[in-house]
Amino acid sequence: MVETESISITRIEQSRLSKTNLNNLPFGKVFTDHMFMADYRDGQWKNSRIVPYGKIQISPATPALHYGQSIFEGMKAYRAADGKALVFRAADNWKRMNISAERMCMPVVPEDLFMDALSTLIDLDRNWIPTQEGSSLYIRPFMFSADEFIGIRPSLDFTFMILLSPTGPYYSTPVKVKIETHYTRAVEGGTGFAKAGGNYGGAIYPAKLAQDEGYHQLIWTDGKTHEYVEESGTMNLMFVINNTLITPALSDSILAGITRQSVIDLARHWGMQVEERKISIIELVAALKQGRVQEAFGAGTAATIAHIELIGYEDEKFQLPPIESRTFSNRVLNELENIKRGNIQPPFNWISKI
């Protein structure tokens, strides 16, 4: 439930935009002038407000710090030629956030609260949207427990926030990935399908080990048998094998990526054969050895499409075909970028204009 109050706005005294180089933006390190906050108290969302970006006060006893009761989303906005801000598939992110909230015993965020907060904040800080190629305004909605209680039980109080971050490309080059068969990201019955903070915190160490070996990311395998590939870092996995787009079927250990679904929607719209199913390591390695893997890439909000140039498995390394030869992933990347920037009319109702 949410109160029918308007969003109060406290503007920053002096914008930091003039001191920010929007032509040289690292990912996730620069933030706009303002942020949105709302409180869940006594079973209601209230005190919706936009305030200057800055530090926040939380209790050291909050379960968000002790037990990881936090969820988040990632989405992007782009500047159209007419100055409008274009947000890609915002309603899908709202729906997925509430799926995560239910799994983590957190209150759902009403659609009007989510959308009003998003549009008001972006409108206020629209001048922060970068325009150079590969750049965007990254949007981070998130929620965490605001209880002051050390104990394992569903929390009563929560804080919902939205941050905006102008950013450049997440990956500037094709990526090298390693198939992980020891460490586990998620298991059946766990929280892998939710965008919960702990899923990512637990993945940092094995990812670092792979990076020490020269890889950018891991290909995670199922937690029970380590026989089937699932995700790669912050991205869903996709392969073009024998002219068919193949991606692991969704389960409760795989995040339902918004970009993943967009790629599938476009592929089917273009008449391409798509298979959503389990993909075993044995099948993938055999296809790599036989040269049947025409393309491999990750799909996610941060990177959109991240070409995979090399896959490592045990003591073997498999080089993928050159990027310029990848017909489908290059086409879908260009299509998504043009849709997001308003250069073409999307075949689906994916864009919100602000």
Image: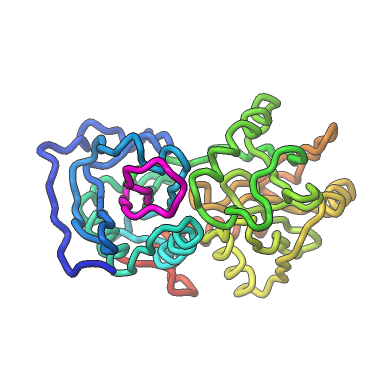
In the shown orientation, is residue 260 left or right of residue 72? right
Q: Quadrant of the N terminus?
A: bottom left
Seen at 48% across and 63% down, the residue is: 99
Q: Position of residue 16 (x, y in %)?
A: 20, 35
Please tell me whether residue 92 is drawn above or below residue 325 in the rendered image.
below
Please tell me whether residue 57 is drawn above or below residue 265 in the rendered image.
above
- 160 magenta-colored: yes
Seen at 26% across and 60% down, the residue is: 42
Q: Position of residue 331 (x, y in %)?
A: 60, 59
The residues colored magenta run: 143-162
- Please tell me which residue lies in front, 141 or 25: 141
Which residue occupies the extreme left position in the image? 13
Look at the image and tell me whether residue 160 can be seen. Answer: no
- Please tell me which residue lies in front, 184 or 256: 184
In the shown orientation, is residue 55 left or right of residue 189? left
Q: Position of residue 61 (x, y in %)?
A: 35, 37
Seen at 72% across and 56% down, the residue is: 239
Q: Quadrant of the C terminus?
A: bottom left
Q: Position of residue 22 (x, y in %)?
A: 32, 38
The quadrant in which residue 199 appears is top right
Please tell me whether residue 236 is drawn above or below residue 96 in the rendered image.
above
Badge count? 0
- Please tell me which residue lies in front, 167 or 192: 192
